[in-house]
Image (cartoon, rainbow, N blue to C red):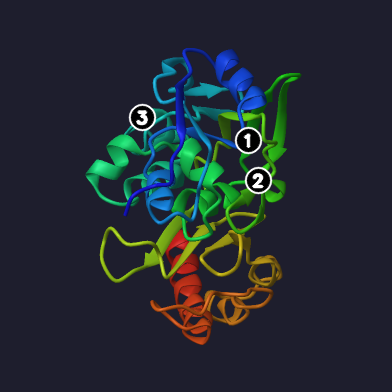
């Protein structure tokens, strides 16, 4: 498949990228390209201008910052997966990054590109939602912070404004909390048919992959766990409030039943 015709511009700085977003017709940012380019080849996405920010090295980092771990939006999945800081302070994030696609995807794809793409079948959006991460967006008037619960608004849509760049993701430290990320797929590199991120503790967090138009928190399960329910009893309500897709890979009914199984397993793993 061949993408529709587009113009190409390479930004040499964050400020230039923001300026190009504000001045070009129907622009789209290009980071690693592993989400955007396939969509363009299928002509699902047809931007008039591609703005390449993949070489902005100052947006690629992982470092401890106060009570959080700060991750630059252009950090490759491979580097997230192999970060010593995340291994120690937020291991579910590094583990999930290592489960994305195949080595080529992990070496080229970026955490910011995955998040900004807003795919409900993506791994990192679900994990970051469970973590209550914070996203930093930078535009012409400066930077603002967006809570993960407010970031994903609809299918492939986020709270980012058209002239904003996602510049940083702030992940809370979770050292000492049990965790699990489980996904079910046909092949290792496929999108998850259903995935579950679980964090144990006094305020348990459960988030679901590919169970609606956005990644979702399983609030009924969280409430049950906080009330003392065991894993099996809490997981029975995993499908409440969800609207899973019905497609060639699995029916909506299958996903609802699968979610219950995976939620129970994820809870049990996070408690072990």
The residue labelled by disc 2 is 148
The mark nearer the N terminus, 1 or 2, is 1
**Tally of marks:** 3
Query: Seen in the image, is 50 located left or right of residue 55?
Result: right
In this view of the protein, which residue sits in the foreground, 232 or 77?
A: 77
The residue depicted at 38 percent of the width and 77 percent of the height is 249
Screen quadrant of the C terminus: bottom left
Could you classify mark 2 by the number of other residues whose Cα lies within 10 Å: few (under 14), some (14-19), or many (20 or more)?
many
Q: Position of residue 51 (x, y in %)?
A: 49, 27
The reply to whether callout 3 and callout 2 are in contact (CB within 8 Å) is no
Q: Earlier in the sequence, mark 3 or mark 2?
A: 3
Residue where numbered disc 1 is placed? 135
- Is there CB contact under 8 Å for labels 1 and 3? no
- Rounded to the nearest angstrom, the CA distance separating label 1 from label 3 is 21 Å
Instruction: Mark 1 vs mark 3: give the one in front.
Output: 1
Residue shown at 39% from the left, 47% from the top: 3
- Residue with the most extreme left position: 103
Against 32, is 205 above or below? below
Helix, strand or loop under label 2: helix
Q: Quadrant of residue 242?
A: bottom right
Residue that badge 3 annotates: 84
Q: Which residue sits furthest right?
A: 141
Q: CA distance from mark 3 to mark 2?
A: 23 Å
Quadrant holding the N terminus: bottom left
In contact (CB < 8 Å): disc 1 and disc 2: yes
């Amino acid at each position: 498949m061949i993408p529709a015709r587009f113009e190409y511009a390479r930004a040499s700085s964050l400020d230039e990228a923001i300026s190009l977003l504000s001045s070009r017709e129907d622009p789209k940012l290009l980071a690693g390209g592993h989400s955007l380019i396939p969509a363009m080849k299928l002509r699902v996405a047809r931007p008039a201008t591609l703005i390449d920010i993949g070489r902005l090295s100052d947006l690629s980092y992982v470092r401890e910052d106060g009570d959080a771990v700060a991750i630059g939006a252009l950090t490759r999945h491979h580097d997230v997966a192999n970060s010593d800081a995340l291994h120690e302070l937020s291991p579910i994030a590094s583990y999930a990054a290592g489960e994305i696609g195949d080595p080529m995807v992990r070496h080229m794809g970026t955490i910011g590109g995955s998040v900004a793409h807003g795919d409900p079948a993506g791994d990192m959006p679900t994990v970051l939602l469970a973590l209550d991460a914070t996203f930093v967006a930078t535009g012409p008037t400066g930077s603002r912070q967006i809570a993960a619960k407010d970031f994903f608004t609809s299918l492939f849509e986020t709270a980012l404004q058209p002239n904003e760049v996602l510049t940083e993701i702030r992940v809370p430290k979770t050292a000492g909390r049990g965790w699990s990320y489980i996904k079910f797929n046909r092949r290792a590199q496929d999108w998850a048919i259903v995935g579950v991120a679980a964090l144990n503790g006094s305020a348990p967090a459960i988030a679901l992959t590919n169970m609606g138009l956005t990644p979702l928190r399983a609030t009924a399960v969280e409430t049950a766990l906080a009330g003392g329910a065991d894993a099996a009893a809490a997981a029975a309500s995993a499908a409440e409030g969800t609207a899973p897709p019905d497609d060639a890979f699995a029916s909506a009914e299958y996903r609802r039943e699968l979610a219950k199984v995976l939620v129970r397993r994820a809870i049990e793993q996070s408690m072990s």
